[in-house]
Image (cartoon, helix red, strand yellow):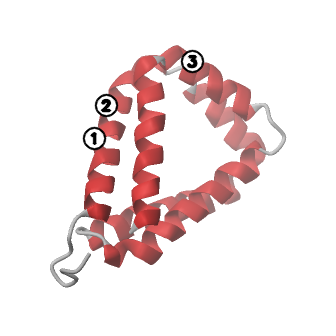
């Protein structure tokens, strides 16, 4: 459950950055997309985060939802792998141009991050000692 709460806290932190500076977020995407390890890091991070959500979903108040989000992240990682680094980089560069969307997306992401933390740290009905 603490691993999932950590994912929620990471989501909250990144969301606050998106809300505070959408232009900075867009520049960050462009800077990261230029790194040689960009594609591998994106795939690996999604596999790790998705796998963690799937593995520990049962310890949350919303196991089906957490598991589903985890499987979506794993599927995205597989999709990125199939896409290849060149097309992935082009997609990232194009997505950086939508900076007007980042602030509203940040608010949605912030709410989801809070939900994930609360779901991870809440008391599950089958394990009242948590």
Contact between labelled residues 1 and 2, with CB atoms less than 8 Å apart: yes
Q: Residue at x 37, y 70 (%)?
A: 67
* Residue 77 versus residue 38 in the image, above or below: below
* x and y, in percent, of residue 27 in the image: 63, 20
View extreme (right): residue: 36
Where residue 102 sits, quadrant-wise, is top left
> Which mark, by number, is residue 56?
none
N-terminal-most mark, 3 or 2 = 3
* Residue 113 versus residue 32 in the image, above or below: below
- The residue beneath circle 3 is 24
Q: Quadrant of the N terminus?
A: bottom left
- The residue beneath circle 1 is 111
* x and y, in percent, of residue 45 in the image: 62, 55
> Which mark, by number, is residue 107?
2
Disc 2 from disc 1: Cα separation: 6 Å
* Residue 70 versus residue 102 in the image, above or below: below
Q: Secondary structure at mark 2?
A: helix
N-terminal-most mark, 1 or 3 = 3
Is 114 placed left or right of 25 in the picture? left
Q: Secondary structure at mark 3?
A: helix
């Amino acid at each position: 459950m603490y691993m999932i709460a950590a994912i929620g806290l990471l989501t909250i932190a990144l969301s606050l950055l998106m809300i505070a500076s959408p232009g900075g977020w867009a520049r960050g995407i462009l800077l990261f997309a230029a790194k040689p390890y960009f594609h591998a890091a994106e795939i690996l991070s999604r596999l790790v985060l998705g796998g963690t959500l799937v593995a520990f979903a049962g310890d949350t108040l919303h196991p089906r939802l957490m598991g589903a989000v985890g499987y979506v992240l794993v599927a995205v990682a597989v999709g990125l792998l199939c896409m290849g680094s060149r097309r992935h980089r082009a997609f990232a560069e194009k997505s950086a141009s939508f900076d007007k969307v980042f602030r509203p997306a940040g608010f949605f992401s912030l709410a989801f991050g809070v939900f994930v933390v609360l779901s991870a740290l809440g008391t599950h009905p089958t394990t009242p000692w948590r």
